[in-house]
Amino acid sequence: MNNLLSPLYPAPSLNLSVDPSFYLVPHADAESDNVHALFRRKIHYKGAGKVIFHLAVHGRYSFYINGYYGMGPVRGTDSRIFVDSYDLTRSLSEGENVLTVELHYPGSSYRTVPAGIPALWAEIEGAAESPWEYAQDIRHKKSFEFTFQLGKCENRDDREKDFAFIPAQKAVNPNHVELVPRPIPPLTADEYFFTKICKCGFLPEFSPDDDDFAKRLAEEVQFCAPDAVKDGVFAPPPPGYHGTFAIFDLGREFYGNVVLEFETDESVIVDRSYDEILTFSRVKSRFAFCKWIPRARHAGDSYRFSDRRIAAPGKNIVSVDFGDRGGRFVEIAFRNHTKAVKVTKISVTDRLYPVQASLFKCDDPFFDRLDAMCAHTVRHCVADTFVDCPWREQAFWVNDLEVAARYYFLLSSDPAIVEHVLQVALDGRKKYDWLPAVYPAGDSMPFLSIPAIWVIVLYDSWLHSGNRQFVKRILPMAIEVLKDYEKFTDETGLVPEHPTWWNFIDLAYVNAKADLQGHTAVLNTLIAAAWRCVARMGDDSEAEAKALKICNALKENLWDDSKKMFRDSDVPGHGFELYSAHPAAILICYDLMPELLTELSQQLYARGVLQPEPYYQRFSVEAALKTDQTEKCEKELRCIWQDMVNSDSPTVWELSKFGPRPDSNTANSCCHAFSAVPMWYTRRVMAGIRPVEPGFKKFVCAPLYKGDFHCIQPTPYGSIEAIQKDGKLTVNFPPEITRV
């Protein structure tokens, strides 16, 4: 990857004018769909001195100069665009160089790019000014929606080369957004190679005018032939067939760019599709159940996990320059070829947020494998933000962040990405007057739980990083975020469920078909916990009083004294008859209602009590530790995650009973960070390494596991290493911190 240019970090400061100018895409606005544009300019280099390229776009970009390239950006918000800065010096030749920027704006309906007028902002330091030119990128053709969480499929014809460049049109900041230096480090560029072929063969005749390539990949008859692909050569199809295919298994999750290098003597069509599982031994490139997709104005009637490239004769390098792809399996189909196609490389470049060294190994095969699955999952759900999942839904969900960030801190002590996304969520509040559940997005997508969850994430970040400066700066906003609940709080002192919002908490309630209405215990315990977090971060007596006031209201309105449990709701038929472990676990985690600790402890694993799905098991694990119920907790974890461990999946699944079954026909994810709570159990309970003071300034290492293990926990001061062998525990840690 020597030709990859990584953005500078820490990012240099910007010398911006009061209202910087942008180069526009003519005749495009925020409502334009699938805009592809080219910008270029000449750089005259004298052979000495640095040349720094600053750029920001509404949308996505890739740029090229003398065989070197870069791609990005950090996804922006409605009010801020993040500027990437590159040192171009090693890519330049003495004399004239041509820098080309490709810009893609998928449209305003998608959840990976905020709405805005498609435009480029660029400055070059260390080189004489020369004018920018613009051309429509005619290589890109009509395209289908990949998913409304990601954007568009690629449909590109590399035979098109006649670009009509004209002087670029300049305008003063058309979106009125702030330009901000890149806030996070460059993403990784680790390369992994596809070596295992699951199946290969030939494809029947088709019409090139059939441009729904995802549907064709999903539905066409495949004629298996073991020798159709051998030693990287896709054999020419026999008479009556038009193409050759192969399904590759990486054996691990990927999140980034699938790169295909090949040589051909003729123009060929290259279709690619991606998935985390095989469905009836095929890559499922089209899910047709999505007849109506809310919040996606350009939505089709399906998810289409596929891309097309029409390649010219010669050597070709095919990837997707304007979006990341995720999964485990890739299907490659060469169409309309009569001669052999020689594939010299098929690989994936993971584009993930970098983390420090972390480790957990033990002599229990179940937890040893499960921890590795969880760590692999969390890594692949953190890129330029935290994502729902790499394959289907690369959107930033704030409710997923509540657990994913917590598991991230098992792998790294760097708070930059967590602090960044907390700020991004605040940009959503600025736009919608309420913290959105997913952002950027076409609308606010409100959950009542989100303000409380956002504050809990802030507290977890402070606890693990010890970054007091960030907390001090943002804590006043945390108080304002929680005050947003005042517009809903009624005479009971509780916040009722919203009659029209999706009041999502945990999939356990969805699976139980529990339509919680009225005042619910789980929502209000979250709000109380958030106020307790504010009090701990700022020693705020008013915040503490608000937490206790909610607790008193909960006891008055939802406590069932006959069962010694909290009801889930005060509305008959909508949770009044239901009891779940969620409220008790949350209260125990944040040391609320200590006078009811015995009763709450008994509610955790009581018969007839609804247990959390993987998402909210995070509260149950910590509550079990605090109430000496780790044996019951371990039994529950083994029950929920057993199918995952028994499978060949490299990652943990979104739902406890969903997995890579050969007859599966669902778009649920097999790589979902909110299901990684076993990693919390192995490292915080089994190895027993836990922060006592923020940033691990003081920590505990009190293992509950009796067997052998090796655990490395990063801290801001260096790593804690705990090794237990034959009953003897050795703990090594930096001198700046104290074990208590």
Image (cartoon, rainbow, N blue to C red):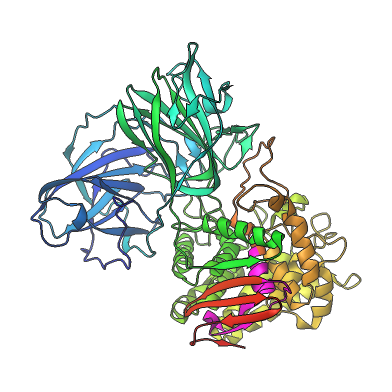
In the visual, does 291 lie left or right of 130?
right
* The quarter of the displayed image where residue 676 is located: bottom right
**Residue most extreme to the right:** 562
**Residue most extreme to the front:** 726
* Camera-nearest residue between 202 and 601: 202
Residue at left offset 55%, top offset 73%: 713
Image quarter of the C terminus: bottom right
Asked if residue 694 lies in the magenta stretch, the reply is yes
- 513 versus 722 height, above or below: above
Residue 20 position within the rendered picture, expressed as x and y whole percent measured from the top left: 23, 58
Residue 59 position within the rendered picture, expressed as x and y whole percent measured from the top left: 36, 48
Residue 492 visible to the viewer: no
Specify the segment rendered in magenta: 679-708
* Camera-nearest residue between 244 and 174: 244
Residue 18 position within the rendered picture, expressed as x and y whole percent measured from the top left: 22, 64
Residue at left offset 79%, top offset 55%: 574
In the visual, does 9 lie left or right of 622?
left
